[in-house]
């Protein structure tokens, strides 16, 4: 797969998104999108995550030469509890507090996926918004502190990684597991197929 010609540009620095995209047989070129991810006032979480994903895609689309004139795929993921967006914790205190708030509760993980296609300055836009409900068992402060010490929560929305050590907190999940990781594969594959971009469809003869 690594030797195949890229069929799109992934506007993300996330190794998880790159891995997920390769899982469905989509070779790609990576260009990191540098955008402001600050929430606008009381902006609803659904609008926020969609706006940031679109901003990432547009930022990379504007750099046509660097992205090799490929379609651009971008995504953004956020964790929402009681209507409040939980971003990436920057300190141990923030990380422990986030897990304490999530423990024994059910929260939502929203992932927006945007695909830009075309050959002009005004690309076609396709998008999906995927919501998943994740239920955590209770988590005490000592366990949350040990988890922070692992280094895993530092760059994760909500302060945990469902595919890593954070899996031990998950009592139940309804929706897209890969969406919680950062790229909902079913919806992403549908977007790509709609745009005529091939995804894995079985062994190559």
Image (tube, grey):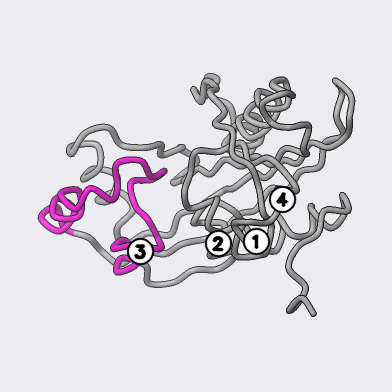
Earlier along the polypeptide chain: callout 2 or callout 3? 3
Q: Which mark is residue 136?
A: 3
The magenta-colored residue range is 140-169
| Mark 2 neighbour density, 10 Å: few (under 14) some (14–19) many (20 or more) | some
* Main SS class of the magenta portion in the image: helix
Q: Which mark is residue 185?
A: 1
Earlier along the polypeptide chain: callout 3 or callout 4? 4
Residue beneath the point at 61% across and 42% down:
75
* Position of residue 45 measured from the top left corner of the image (x, y, whole percent): 57, 37
Secondary structure beneath label 3: strand
Q: Which mark is residue 20?
A: none
Q: Which mark is residue 5?
A: 4
Are the two marked residues, 1 and 2, in contact with CB atoms closer than 8 angstroms? yes
Magenta-colored stretch includes residue 166: yes
Q: Which quarter of the rendering shows the N terminus? A: bottom right
**Alpha-carbon distance for marks 4 and 1?**
21 Å
Earlier along the polypeptide chain: callout 4 or callout 1? 4
**Alpha-carbon distance for marks 3 and 4?**
41 Å
The quarter holding residue 93 reads: top left
């Amino acid at each position: 797969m690594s030797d195949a010609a890229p069929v799109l540009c992934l506007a993300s620095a996330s190794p998880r998104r790159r891995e997920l995209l390769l899982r469905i047989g989509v070779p790609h070129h990576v260009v990191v999108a540098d955008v402001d991810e600050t929430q606008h006032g009381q902006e609803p979480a659904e609008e926020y995550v969609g706006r940031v994903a679109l901003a990432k895609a547009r930022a990379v689309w504007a750099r046509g030469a660097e992205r090799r004139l490929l379609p651009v795929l971008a995504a953004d993921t956020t964790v929402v509890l009681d209507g409040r967006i939980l971003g990436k914790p920057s300190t141990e205190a923030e990380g422990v507090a986030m897990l304490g708030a999530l423990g024994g509760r059910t929260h939502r993980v929203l992932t927006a996926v945007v695909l830009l296609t075309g050959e002009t300055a005004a690309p076609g836009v396709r998008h999906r918004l995927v919501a998943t409900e994740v239920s955590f068992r209770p988590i005490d402060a000592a366990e949350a502190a040990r988890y922070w010490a692992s280094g895993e929560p530092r760059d994760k929305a909500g302060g945990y990684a469902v595919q890593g050590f954070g899996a031990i907190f998950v009592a139940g999940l309804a929706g897209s597991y890969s969406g919680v990781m950062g790229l909902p594969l079913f919806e992403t594959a549908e977007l790509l197929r709609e745009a005529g971009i091939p995804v894995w469809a079985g062994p190559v003869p």
